[in-house]
Image (cartoon, grey):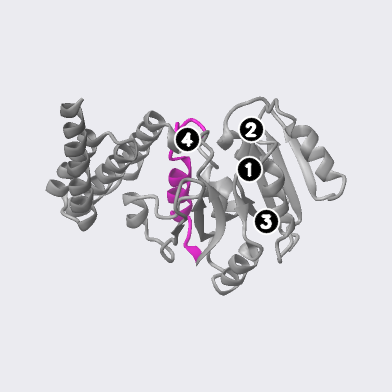
Amino acid sequence: MSGISAIIPTYNRADLLPVAIRSIQDQSLPVGEIIIVDDGSGDGTVEVVEQMARDDRRIRLLQRRHGGANRARNAGAAEARGQWLAFLDSDDAWEPDRLAAQWDVLRTRPEAVAAFCGFRMIGSGAERIFLPPDNPSLLALRCANVLSSTSSALIRADILERAGGFDAELPSCQDWDLWFRLRQLGPFAVVRKPLVIINEGDHDRITTNNAKVIEGHRRVFERLKHGVDAPMQRRRITAAHMLVLASAFKRHREWKQALGLACRSLMEFPSRWGLNLALTSAAGLMRTGRRAKKA
């Protein structure tokens, strides 16, 4: 399908990039072009891309000063010729039928402005699978990033332009912010199969920097709660955001902060997620206290 442009932003991942590119080349539904946006790499990335481009004329290399993945994604989108844009992080990969499956569901949903799919997470212990909900509502997206990975997105190019692209000024949560703006412009089509492989073993990801995660989340929350007047909906959204923040603290074993936010969330809008997070955080805090006493 020549109407699809694949876009890979990359920075100093010359060792991982070929795997990502080959996963695009192996698609059962071919793309029209593969745009590699080199975000100022200094590790031989350019040479890797140029070598692969000799064997595949669809590969185009864009070079720019280092400015972050989302500026690179926007730069790639601006240069793309396809009517649909498929993004892939340079440390991730697609299953061979990823685009074909999304295209099949888009043919039954001509009103959709974007398509998403599930993914497998590897590289940090036991493999995990994430499956997004079908056509999430605006309320669901106000509460949480229920779609998550940029590597699963297939977006109409004209709609991405109308939405304003990725907000590169946000320190994190840029994907969540964009999904909400896209959903305001139309419905999504979703393939509930894990067709993307996410490599969590790369510690350069934004999600490993808790300060960036929290600051980005706070900014996005201010945007997402705007225009919500119904008191119960505001409470539900506020509670959900407290739990997202609590989860970020929990991942870094900052149990006291996680417990405090989980408890505040339960007071705002009780949920099983909040209760489980509060209990887990309390147990973690107790374990930390016991170890401190023994020391």
Residue at left offset 59%, top offset 48%:
92
Outermost residue, front direction? Answer: 294
> Would you say 74 lies left or right of 121 here?
right
The number of discs equals: 4
Tags 4 and 1 in contact by the CB under 8 Å rule?
Answer: no
Q: State the image coordinates of residue 219 (x, y, percent, origin top left).
A: 36, 34
Q: Is residue 157 visible?
A: no
Amino acid type assigned to the residue bearing label 1 in the image? Ser
Outermost residue, left direction? Answer: 267
Residue at left offset 59%, top offset 34%:
71
Q: Which residue is denoted by mark 3 in the rendering? A: 83
Q: Which residue is denoted by mark 4 in the rendering? A: 206
State which region is magenta. Answer: 168-190
Q: State the image coordinates of residue 238 (x, y, percent, origin top left).
A: 23, 45
The mark that comes first in sequence, 3 or 4, is: 3
On whether residue 174 falls in the magenta region, the answer is yes
Task: Tell me the distance, in whole angstroms, between the alpha carbons under discs 2 and 4.
Answer: 13 Å
